[in-house]
Image: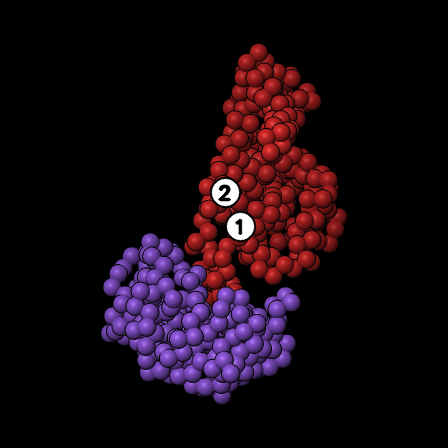
Amino acid sequence: MNSLRVISYTVALLLLVPLVVLLYYGLGPFRSSAGLTTGIFRSIELSIVSSAIAAAVDFALFTPLSYYLARSQDPVVESLVDIPVGIPHPIVGVALLILDSPLTPTGQFLLYLGINFFNTILGLVFALVIMSAPIYVKSMQPYFESRDPAAEDFAMGLGASRLRSLYSVVLPDSTRGIVSASLIAMSRALGEFGSVSIIAFYVLQAPFYGVSPASVTIFQLYSGAMPGGIDAAVTASAAMILVALPITLAGHLVQRRGRV
Amino acid sequence: MIDAVVRAHVGAFKISADIEGEGVTCVAGTNGAGKTSLMKALAGFVQLDEGHVRVGGVDVGRLPIEKRGIVLVTPGSFFPHLDVKSHIKWGARLKGETLSEEQTAKVSKDLGIDFEGPVRNLSLGMRERVSLATALLAKPRAVLVDEVFSSLHDREAFVKIYGGLAKASGVELIFTSQDEADGKLADRMYVMREGTASLNGS
């Protein structure tokens, strides 16, 4: 067991080596004021706000689905939810673009309704929901599965439908699972780059007019599209990690504490 | 009046029971005899291969679980986030019925519920009293009590009181026990051995 533990710790830490190096250089030798401008902080702010909204949407729409999967083991729905995980993320961005393009009937219809994904907060959040919802479900489903179904069975015997039982019996007693899954989904959304770089390279709406998501801004700094050079990219990345890490850690801590 | 013919299986384990009667029924048997599986089959959580479940002349076996009017009470049958008072009224409220203070006070007193506060803070025995009161006050067709009475300190007296309340409300009561001597607390007893129930163990 001990050697297994050593191996496990070693490879887990190996995953973190690049981040530690980045944090060291970003906050130390390479620290650049161009990586800590108001513009960068606005980008991080946009990422946090849009990811939090995406996590809230995940909770509202995908909690019943997670519960359904936990109690019925429906392989069809389970595979459907998993599909976005398996495709390259930019494809999701392109798909959203086509869905809402003035060149397609679906896009014409959506635009007629005033629904526009391209460079809007709505499009950004939609992409983040698609990318984070499977993570939310993967965290929520085992939580529900680990619950003793006795209370739900009792509620159903008393006359409650499955859905009623979910809202009246399961959810009030699942705060920890919901908070944990939402934080994990939010941290997944914070890290999204591929899809948002296509559908919402920047958003053209108040209060974030002209602001790009943090991952896109960092890419622009790195590629030279924004002034500041590699030092600024490294510094901004370190700042982003410092913001995102506590959210991820909190999600996992809440989950662990919930295990009895 | 319960009239149930149960042929079901849980994995490779087969359940076979013909249950008929009115009032209080005891199903006795050792661990692994199939008591819990039988209760689950009657409540609709285990599908029947063959047979039927009729209560009060209604073929409830064909109905979805929430429409059967059969409440299964196990040690896990409680809602931890509710306080005792709202817990007791939960099932009745779900049906749109309003219970008077006298009704809840009487059942609470008879079942020895003299405590308040969140159900999550209660001991096992106290929780079970609350669950049993909740089941009864919902006025279902039948209450099935699985492995619950055995953890009450005043078990015999309690079963008699609970059975009396159930009869007074026209609710069928089936309870399981590991001890065949508990048959004396019921109007009839079935003994389960290796998945098969027989009247008085004959």
Chain shaded red: A
Mark 1 crowdedness (10 Å alpha carbons): few <14, some 14-19, many ≥20: many
Instruction: Give me the residue at 52% from left, 26% from top.
Output: A242
Quick check: do tags 2 and 1 share a chain?
Answer: yes
Q: Is residue B71 visible?
A: no
Element at badge 2? helix
Which label is found at residue A255?
A: 2
Q: Height in image: B126 above or below B8?
A: above
State the separation of the CA atoms marked 2 and 1.
9 Å
Name the spot of residue B57 as percent of width and height, x first.
Answer: 49, 88
Q: Which corner quadrant of the image does residue B9 belong to?
A: bottom right
Chain shaded purple: B
User: Label 1 belongs to which residue?
Assistant: A143
Q: Looking at the image, do the residues carrying marks 2 and 1 touch, with CB atoms under 8 Å apart?
A: yes
* Viewer-side residue, A88 vs A260: A260
Name the spot of residue B74 as percent of width and height, x first.
Answer: 44, 65
Name the spot of residue B148 as percent of width and height, x first.
Answer: 40, 66
* Viewer-side residue, B56 vs A243: B56
Name the spot of residue A47 as percent of width and height, x first.
Answer: 56, 35
Q: Residue furthest right?
A: A103
Q: How many marks?
A: 2
